[in-house]
Amino acid sequence: MKKIIFTVTNDLNHDQRMIRICTALALEKYDVHLIGRLLPHSKPIVNQLFTQHRLKIWFQKGKFFYAEYNIRLFFFLLKNQFDRVCGIDLDTILPCYLVSKLKQKVCIYDAHEYFTEVPELIGRPTTKRIWEKIADFVLPKIKYCYTVGSCLATLFEERYGVPFEVIQNVPFRQSIKNQNIKNNRIILYQGALNAGRGLEIAIEAMQHIEGAVLWLAGEGDLSQSLRQQVENQGLTHKVIFLGFIAPKDLPQCTAQATIGLNLLDATSLSYYYSLANKFFDYMQYGVPQINMRFPEYEKIGLRYEVSALIDDLSVNALVQALKKILNDDDYYNQLKINSLEAAKIFNWEKESQKLLHFYRNMEM
């Protein structure tokens, strides 16, 4: 039985993509280990079909966190045997690559995002250069790579000169369907309340939308400032903060929504080339949605028309899209039907076969 170690920098319990990937490979009889970190508020690890381990880190953020985590991960990998090690994004790939070379084992790179272009690095040129140097040093030497969308795959192939497979971040097929969600008039955003997600715009837009409410399901860096914005603009009756919702409870929330929001700031190339998991989540529940006219969303939108696409992240553009879906029954119903049809194609039952093929055909 081949042993595969996956490495991430998060808490493990709520990383749905990694849970899906690790479970699929464990069912295929691989010995799968997922390594993350222990946070001060971490709850006990939820049992899965694979082994999980959290590294205890003293520093919780910033450059000291990344330095400490990479050092601890290096020695963890050095002490533990494996056949393959997969680094998730740039923040874990360096120790994976170095130890794999020392042990003459296979190293794999899984790019969830365009890491050197995330919003957190905008305005931090020195930190960005460090991550770019790591990428330029490691990635051209890794034979087995995959990412979440075709645009990122093309971009990475051109920059690093190695092929990237595409394994999309799609959910399992869902049976929960609410046939009357049009009447709920609930506009839903699910995900982290972080910068670059258009959340301030969404809240401001509610001043121009009557007979509907905005649900924000999640917490993040902007949790307090967004709540203050709602207070200041007198929108407490229209904007509801649901707080963090556990993944197992999120389907019941999503199934109630009339419209799903996936708004992103184009100043981040990571966002511009993204293909967010919430895009596919809304699709699974037949929820019409609003997306930016970014490459991946436009490509799928042109073929399946599951969403309204807006050209710029502005209150006016968002209000127009919201009103069209809320007030045009024919348009709403067509988006809903298209979403349910597309959900038959974009789901983990199908996508996991690509993952298994990728790992089965890997040389040792």
Image (cartoon, rainbow, N blue to C red):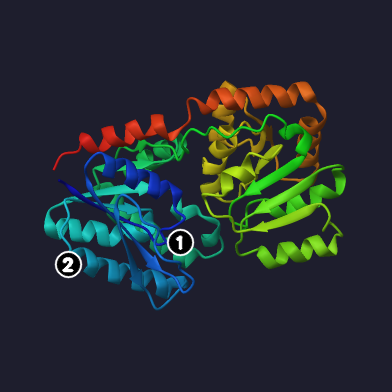
* Residue in the foreground of this view, choosing between 214 and 95: 214
Image quadrant for the C terminus?
A: top left
Residue 119, percent from left and from top:
55, 57
Q: Disc 1 marks which residue? A: 128
Res. 234 image quadrant:
bottom right
* Secondary structure found at label 2: helix
Seen in the image, is 166 located left or right of residue 118?
A: left
* Residue in the foreground of this view, choosing between 191 and 145: 191
Q: Which mark is residue 342?
A: none
Tell me what residue is drawn at x 63 percent, y 51 percent: 197
* Residue in the foreground of this view, choosing between 248 and 18: 248
Tell me what residue is drawn at x 74 percent, y 55 percent: 240
| Residue type at the position of mark 1 | Lys
Seen in the image, is 206 located left or right of residue 199?
A: right
Q: Is residue 276 visible?
A: no
Tell me what residue is drawn at x 85 percent, y 60 percent: 233
Residue 310, percent from left and from top:
70, 36
* Residue in the foreground of this view, choosing between 38 and 85: 38
Tell me what residue is drawn at x 66 percent, y 40 percent: 260
Q: Disc 2 marks which residue? A: 79
Looking at this rendering, what residue extends furthest in the bottom direction?
58
* Secondary structure found at label 1: helix
Res. 196 image quadrant:
bottom right
| Residue type at the position of mark 2 | Lys
Upstream in the sequence, badge 1 or badge 2?
A: 2
How far apart are the two marked residues, 1 and 2, measured between alpha carbons?
A: 31 Å
Residue 107, percent from left and from top:
23, 50
10 Å crowding of disc 2: few (<14), some (14-19), many (20+): few
Decide: is 213 above or below 280: below
Res. 289 image quadrant:
top right
Seen in the image, is 140 located left or right of residue 212?
A: left
